[in-house]
Amino acid sequence: MRKSYKLILSTLILTLVIPVTVMGSGATTASDKEPGTSGEPAAPTYSNVSVHDPSIVRDGDNFYVFGSHIEAAKSTDLMNWETFTNGYTTPNNVIYGNLSQNLATSFKWAGENDSDSKGGFSVWAPDVFWNDSYVNADGTKGAYMIYYCTSSTYIRSAIGFGVSQNIEGPYTYVDTLVYSGFTAGEAYDANSVINKKWTNTNIPQLIEGGKLSGSSDKWFNSDGTFSNITYPNAIDPQLMFDENGKLWMSYGSWSGGIFTLQIDPATGKAIYPGKDSVTKDGRLVDRYFGTKIAGGFYKSGEGPYMVYNKQTDYYYLFDTIGWLGADGGYNMRLYRSKNPLGPFVDAAGKSAVLPGDTDVSAFGNKLMGNFLFKREVGDPGTGIGYGYVSPGHNSFYQDPDTGKMFLVFHSRFPQKGEFHEVRVHQMFMNKDGWLVTAPYRYSGESLEKVKREDLIGEYKFINHGKGTTADLVESSYITLNKSNKVTGDAAGTWKSTGHNEAELTLDGKTYKGVFVKGWDPSSEQFVMTFTAMSNEGVTIWGSKQEDLKDSQIVADIKADLNIGDTSRVIANLDLPSEGMRHASITWTSSNPDVVSAAGVVVRPDSGSSNAAVTLTAVITKGTVTSSKVFNLTVLPYEDATLVAKYSFENDLTDSTGSFGAGSVTGNRIDNTGGTISYTDGVDGNAAVLDGASGVRLPNKLIDSNQYSVSLWVKPEQLTTYTTTFFGAKDGYNWVSLLPKGPVGDNTMVWSGSNVWYDGIAGLTIPTSSWTHLAYSVDNGTLSVYVNGELKFSGSNFPDIFTGTDSVFSLGVNWWDTPFKGQLDELQVYEGALSPPQIAELVNP
């Protein structure tokens, strides 16, 4: 499930230098503390960057990560990063010089102004390393080598490489090694003039040079298309020297799997098998693509990274499965083998090469997926807690001096949409020779001897499971007792052996790993943690909590408990029923007809007086109880004022006269060439959008944080992300009314800004029938209505439009599939619609 056009553009927008510093009491470096020393490193600082698909390499005192979209960054301590690149700039590209000319041979096949890269470039997932054996054009030896991929569709891609005497570039193109997505005969993708026939790759030259025995009919389906159920998408190259000095390139992605080719260190070029065969365990060896080591059968799996560990004498293979977006459940998996060509297996003995069309989530040790160490009421810190969304496409580094091992990856974050940053976590070898990952990002910590008494206590607990899901795995609580029993939300036993080994048996499953201190960003202190993995490849984490008496827990919850602005209540309240450590919170209301004990708010009618209500929270932990009182003022509704009305009576005029007419667009908000027709609608005529056109509305149609939008919608088809009404300050800040959104296919109001927002209706509207959709924003309170019924109410909705020259449209935005169907009676209001007004709009 590789990158769609929308997410390519989103990544381009979001792949920026984001210098965010998280302050402790001072900075530290990776060398401040080494194994065996006492005490803790200084509280860390972090400077963050956005580099997608980061591949790590060390050069002198600097660590580098090179990633997709020609982004890269460097650091001296794996915590504070700075970029040095200029993205897709050409000429004078930092990494590639004259990008378009330098990579022209690769771009002839894919990646420049073509199909999914139309109007730009797609250069992804490079791997950089120093090669002592490479013979330069002048006969000298030694060069930095960059292996990159260019791509135009989910299967048409190419892998090439370049060389430089400077790790930061520019790199000079040498050759393109592997092509994918080719066809048996002449064929073209949408928005492309490139003939995909196999003879337009390097395969004919390889055959002529005796390096391949010929072309293979197996590369093609019966209709001549590329057989991507078996063969790879040529992306995500990674290079590794094995224990004997041989150089290997692993590469590929869904849906045909991941392959390995031997590389000649002197030339950097592939040593192709030349003829087809199978391995002893029955895996495919293709004459051109190499040996299959993972995946297949249309299943996800990408970003391979292979390393050799002298301690265990195993080759470890990382890959990432799922979809990379915030809604895709991207997660990292691990296998191992005694041979760089495999077979690679997980802790349960399952092969990395899939046996058929099956659930890929059942294969591989899951290192981490979506998780949240949830901040409960009373916990230290702010916000919702610490967690990741869709962490993946990792690389790995082991320090030759200290032996420290690091997992390097990109991650998105809860409630942050497609925004992503690089993260580095330390890894450790468990008793069974499997790598496990620290719960917290690297902070200079080292693995040390632990004291048993420091391990006893209550922990926030994460069980990552094996699934691939967009859902967050939220923390629960367990206690490691003096008796070596585990109690709480999971039950079993625990023990520590050696200096720091951890072994937990929970619900009949045994997990092996380590105890290690890590930097908890919520409490801003080093805490004891554990990371461990079962023989089923399931990872568990624990983060020790401060030892507190019940009275202190209740006091902390009471001090932290907050329900927002009580002086102007206009929407349902989020009243928590539980605080930290499973303390209970119960609520009573002095006037449940206005505000119920569940937080449901019934505002007085328009023209009525304010209503006063007292809410009382009773907090209980064990035998300790305390209460907190909140005095609320509930405001009456105020009727919203109509400011624009587009009725589509054979034109795009605003019947109020306040704004100009709309204009027809193509398939994007700023394109031309579309067409609009009209047909019978809900009231008079309606606009018909053909799935390739939209309507550009006047700028500044909304210019406040108190507004409402109402329209009738009759979709002919439902496609994810497709908008009906869209408004945006820029590509970073927008609001979209979606018939089918990215959260469970729900109809929703979706906003992208510093914090992404999902106003979910809890249903999906039907096709081929009229549905009334409306939403109101009242100084951060969002209300979403379907056919006059309130389906969502929430606070903290972003102010996108106030004081901006925002753009607005119907049916199109900058990225997604245009709306196909009918729209009628678009009405825009100043202020939030009252219930009588909503009812009037649905039943005039």
Image: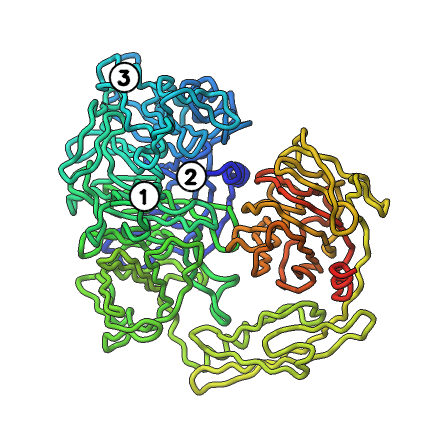
Which residue corresponds to mark 3? Answer: 206
Name the front one of labels 1 and 2.
Answer: 2
Which residue in the protein does label 1 denote?
319
First reached walking from the N terminus: tag 2 or tag 3 = 2
Corner quadrant of residue 142: top left
Q: Residues within 10 Å of mark 3 (few under 14, many from 20)?
A: some
Q: Which residue is at 23% across, 33% downward? A: 291
Q: Decide: few, some or many residues near mark 1? Use Cα within 10 Å; few <14, some 14-19, many ≥20.
A: many
Check disc 1 and give the amino acid type: Asp
Q: In this rendering, does residue 431 appear at all?
A: yes
Task: Give how far apart the Cα atoms at labels 1 and 2 are.
Answer: 14 Å
Which circle's residue, 1 or 2, is located before the other in the chain?
Answer: 2
Tell me the number on the disc at residue 515.
none
Q: Position of residue 65 (x, y in %)?
A: 38, 37
Contact between marks 2 and 3 (CB within 8 A): the answer is no
- 235 on left or right of 537: right
**Secondary element type, mark 1:** strand
Choose top left, top right, bottom left or bottom right for residue 761.
Answer: bottom right
Other-residue count near label 2 (Cα within 10 Å), few / some / many at <14 / 14–19 / ≥20: many
Instruction: For marks 2 and 3, give the CA distance.
Output: 28 Å
What is the basis of the colouring in this image?
Answer: rainbow
Q: Quadrant of residue 146?
A: top left
Check disc 3 and give the amino acid type. Leu
User: Three-letter amino acid code at disc 2?
Assistant: Arg
| Residue, disc 2 | 2
